[in-house]
Amino acid sequence: MKFKYRKFPVTEKTESHPNVNYRSRPVILIFVKHGPRKIPTYSLIDSGADTCIFDASIGKELGIDIVKGKNGKMYGLKQEPVNVYYHNIELSIGGRTFPCYAGFLSPHFKVPYGGILGQEGLFSKFIVKFDYVKRKIELIERKDKKETKKK
């Protein structure tokens, strides 16, 4: 499956890049599914994220009582813990649907783009190729799924 990077306008100029008007990011359209409900959302492919994380509003739209999930902590750049609640859901990417144990952030925090696709959930199921110069992403379904579960 091939996707293009998406362009996002720069809202604040920086001293390091004063002439940049937009940023290209590996953000793709996916569907998050729980039971009969299926929600489209844009999600950032993030090789630095351990798991897939979604905004609380998506969980709510899916009919999930977020805080009843297994509680965990997530740390970002500021190293301040944020509550995450994990649930079994399904993700659909490029017409392929698969199970995913994903987190939903506490309603007090927002997830950029609606979701983040991380190591467990995306990279464990696909070989991910980034080509920043061409602004393209390729997801190749893994044939060695049993091996990724053993590690």
Image (spheres, grey):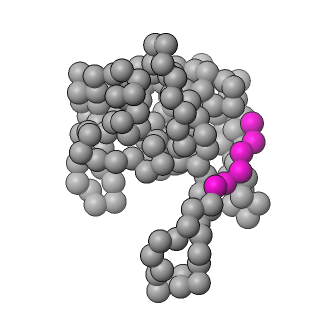
Residue 102 in the image, given as x and y percentages of width and height: 41, 29
Q: Which residue occupies the extreme top position in the image?
A: 35
Reply above or below: 133 against 136: below
Say which residue appears at 54% left-offset and 26% top-offset. 91
Identify the image quadrant of residue 146: top right
Quadrant location of the N terminus in the rendered image:
top right
Say which residue appears at 38% left-offset and 39% top-offset. 55
Q: Relative to the observer, which residue lies in front, 59 or 16?
A: 59
Q: Relative to the observer, which residue lies in front, 104 or 123?
A: 104
Q: Which residues are magenta?
A: 1-6
Identify the image quadrant of residue 73: top left
Q: Please state if 43 lies on the left or on the right of 142 as rendered.
A: left
Instruction: Tell whether position 38 is magenta.
Output: no
Helix, strand or loop for the magenta stretch, by majority: strand
Q: Please state if 65 lies on the left or on the right of 113 as rendered.
A: left
Reply above or below: 77 against 105: below
Reply above or below: 83 against 141: below
Residue 34 in the image, given as x and y percentages of width and height: 45, 18
Q: Relative to the observer, which residue lies in front, 100 or 47?
A: 100
Residue 63 in the image, given as x and y percentages of width and height: 36, 20
Say which residue appears at 41% left-offset and 20% top-offset. 88
Say which residue appears at 56% left-offset and 30% top-offset. 31
Number of marks present in the image shown: 0
